[in-house]
């Protein structure tokens, strides 16, 4: 029997240590301190609170989520109790999470760059370890207009407004539906972002043919789950090429440990987990960890960090192997 | 919840937890076969369709395009039957449905009631919470148990579902707060009496949270197991949005039925 080597699953996001690479994605399970703690106890390496705005928001009416076969589509509509209350919830969550060594991170979103900065100031009172800017929600278009993530100038304007008030590592969550995500990533990093979260959901629609109506009350929504994975892998690959060395939280359709390996190989530092909680239950984090561990053992990896960006290596052509 | 073994090496992942099938994915329209008037604000809709694998205590999401989608516990599964109280714009729209109209359903979802290995379970329903009790009673009778039902309401008008239970041969104790039908007082009073007399070995409850908390107290005091169905507004119904959280529990996937083991503090 070969000796079981201790595997190191920890990753580092701008000096914030995660015990494992799996990050509960924003919007999943909300901001309840007990649910965030539950996710951490079930194996999340970090947890993300639901996006907060300056004022409380109700979100869209049901139906807000539908499983359409190859993935989910959702338009929950960013319900949140407002930044002040979110900060209180997050502070409570942080107290629960500290003994588990799991860092909480916080999202901020709102109409204008100045409002982003105001929300950031409020939620930073809860001392999250990371602040993530959600400039890419596809489901609040009617109220907030085109997401800032749609253009370099838009994305940069928010980062420039928030950077001066942000005292923790600043991540920016980017949208997949842009012609050149690498260029947007490069611009937000130049504007002061410390890391990139990619990707948000992909805009889409599901129509009920019996009624002739879109299923979601918001009519359109964001695609997630398995259908999103190849898009997310491509985006993360492009971002890793554009901003080498900048930490990336790769998010989109990661449902198995093997998916996570792909995402790490595409260049992600950590891996966001959302819809997997639907496909595999609350135990998804535990399954992902076990499957990642099994892959690493089978292939002789001892540290998760060894997987990062492997897909960027030049092709090893068989004819280059010297003949014996 | 189903357990998954670690991923076998060099093999595909375990099958997904989520069932696929006609009702497991997008909402499907079912025709209304029959509308039964329970009282001035509660109606029961019998739909043209079955959920043969659904269990009592589980719920479905019902949707009317152009209106909303909301959770309803199954009053029966073959055919799909929902008891709906008109409490808001959406449920009022549902009450306008007539035989032949369509209602869109997805599900079933959530943790069901599971038979406790006892002979004499007590089934307690408050208000429209009585809806799934006949379905539950049928399941318990099928495994040879002898359930007794307790149905409470504010007034005689609020007491529903008694006939369905009696039709199964289940004894029913009725209570009303104003004494207009059956025993006067809260439904928990005769339940407490049955427990004190050793005539109940497990509690099943559906109704207002206050009633459920009182039942939990009784179960603790008498050291019997309790399975209580906690009503909540569901958003996604599949454990993602966090909207149905109640005391740290995601009621849509970890509930709505929660079991309290005997002797739980």
Image: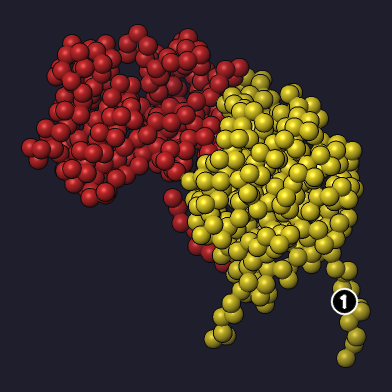
Chain colours: A yellow, B red
Q: Does the rendering let one see residue B4?
A: yes
Residue drawn at 58 percent across, 77 percent down: A6
Q: Is residue B9 above or below residue B2?
A: below
Question: Relative to the observer, which residue lies in front, A242 or A311?
Answer: A242
* Residue A245 % position (x, y): 82, 62
Q: Is residue A254 above or below residue B45?
A: below
- In the displayed structure, does residue A74 sit left or right of residue A157? left
Question: Relative to the observer, which residue lies in front, B46 or B244?
Answer: B244
Residue drawn at 74 percent across, 23 percent down: A142
- In the displayed structure, does residue B177 sit left or right of residue A195? left
**Number of numbered tags placed on the structure image:** 1
* Residue A220 % position (x, y): 71, 28
* Residue B245 % position (x, y): 47, 38
- In the displayed structure, does residue B4 sit left or right of residue A167? left
User: Which chain letter goes with mark 1?
Assistant: A
Which residue matches tag 1?
A318
Q: Quadrant of the C terminus of chain A?
A: bottom right
Instruction: Please tell me how crowded label 1 is: few (under 14), some (14-19), or many (20+) other residues with Cα within 10 Å.
Output: few
């Amino acid at each position: 029997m070969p000796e079981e080597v201790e595997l190191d699953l920890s990753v580092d996001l701008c000096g914030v240590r995660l015990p494992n690479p799996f990050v509960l994605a924003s919007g999943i399970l909300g901001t309840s301190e007990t649910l965030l703690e539950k996710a951490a106890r079930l194996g999340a390496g970090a947890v993300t609170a639901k996006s907060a705005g300056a004022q409380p928001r109700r979100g869209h009416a049901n139906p807000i989520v539908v499983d359409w076969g190859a993935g989910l589509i959702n338009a929950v509509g960013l319900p949140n109790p407002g930044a002040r209350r979110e900060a209180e919830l997050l502070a409570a969550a942080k107290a629960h999470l500290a003994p588990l060594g799991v860092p909480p991170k916080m999202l901020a979103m709102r109409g204008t760059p100045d409002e982003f900065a105001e929300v950031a100031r409020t939620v930073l009172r809860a001392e999250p370890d990371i602040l993530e800017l959600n400039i890419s929600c596809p489901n609040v278009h009617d109220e907030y207009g085109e997401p800032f993530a749609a253009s370099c100038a838009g994305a940069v304007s928010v980062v420039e407004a928030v950077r001066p008030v942000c005292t923790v590592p600043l991540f920016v969550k980017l949208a997949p539906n842009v012609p050149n995500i690498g260029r947007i990533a490069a611009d937000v990093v130049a504007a002061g972002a410390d890391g990139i979260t990619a990707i948000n959901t992909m805009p889409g629609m599901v129509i009920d043919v019996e009624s002739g109506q879109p299923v979601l009350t918001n009519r359109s929504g964001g695609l997630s789950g398995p259908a999103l994975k190849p898009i997310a892998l491509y985006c993360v690959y492009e971002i890793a090429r554009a901003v080498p060395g900048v930490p990336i939280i790769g998010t989109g359709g990661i449902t198995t440990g093997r998916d996570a390996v792909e995402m790490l190989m595409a260049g992600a530092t950590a891996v966001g987990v959302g819809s997997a909680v639907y496909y595999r239950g609350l135990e998804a984090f535990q399954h992902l960890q076990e499957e990642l561990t099994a892959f690493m053992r089978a292939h002789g990896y001892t540290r998760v960090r060894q997987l990062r960006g492997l897909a960027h290596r030049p092709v090893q052509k068989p004819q280059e192997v010297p003949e014996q | 919840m189903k357990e998954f073994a670690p991923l076998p090496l060099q093999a595909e992942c375990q099958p997904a937890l989520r069932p696929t099938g006609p009702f497991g994915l997008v909402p499907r329209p079912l025709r209304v076969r029959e509308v039964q008037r329970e009282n001035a604000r509660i109606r029961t809709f019998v739909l043209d369709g079955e959920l043969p694998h659904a269990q009592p205590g589980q719920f479905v999401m019902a949707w009317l395009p152009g209106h909303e989608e909301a959770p309803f516990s199954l009053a029966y599964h073959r055919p799909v039957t929902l008891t709906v109280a008109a409490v808001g714009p959406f449920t009022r729209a549902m009450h306008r449905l007539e035989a032949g109209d369509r209602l869109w359903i997805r599900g079933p979802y959530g943790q069901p009631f599971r038979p406790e290995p006892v002979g004499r379970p007590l089934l307690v329903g408050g208000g429209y919470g009585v809806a799934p009790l006949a379905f539950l009673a049928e399941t318990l009778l099928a495994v040879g148990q002898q359930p007794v039902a307790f149905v409470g309401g504010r007034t005689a008008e609020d007491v529903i579902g008694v006939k369905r239970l009696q039709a199964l041969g289940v004894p029913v104790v009725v209570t009303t707060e104003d004494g207009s039908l059956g025993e006067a007082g809260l439904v928990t009073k005769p339940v407490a009496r049955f427990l004190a007399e050793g005539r109940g070995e497990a509690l099943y409850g559906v109704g207002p949270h206050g009633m459920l908390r009182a039942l939990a107290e009784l179960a603790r005091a008498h050291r019997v197991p309790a399975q209580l169905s906690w009503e909540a507004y569901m958003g996604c119904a599949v454990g993602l949005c966090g909207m149905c959280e109640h005391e740290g529990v995601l009621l849509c996937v970890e509930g709505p039925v929660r079991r309290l083991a005997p002797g739980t503090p």
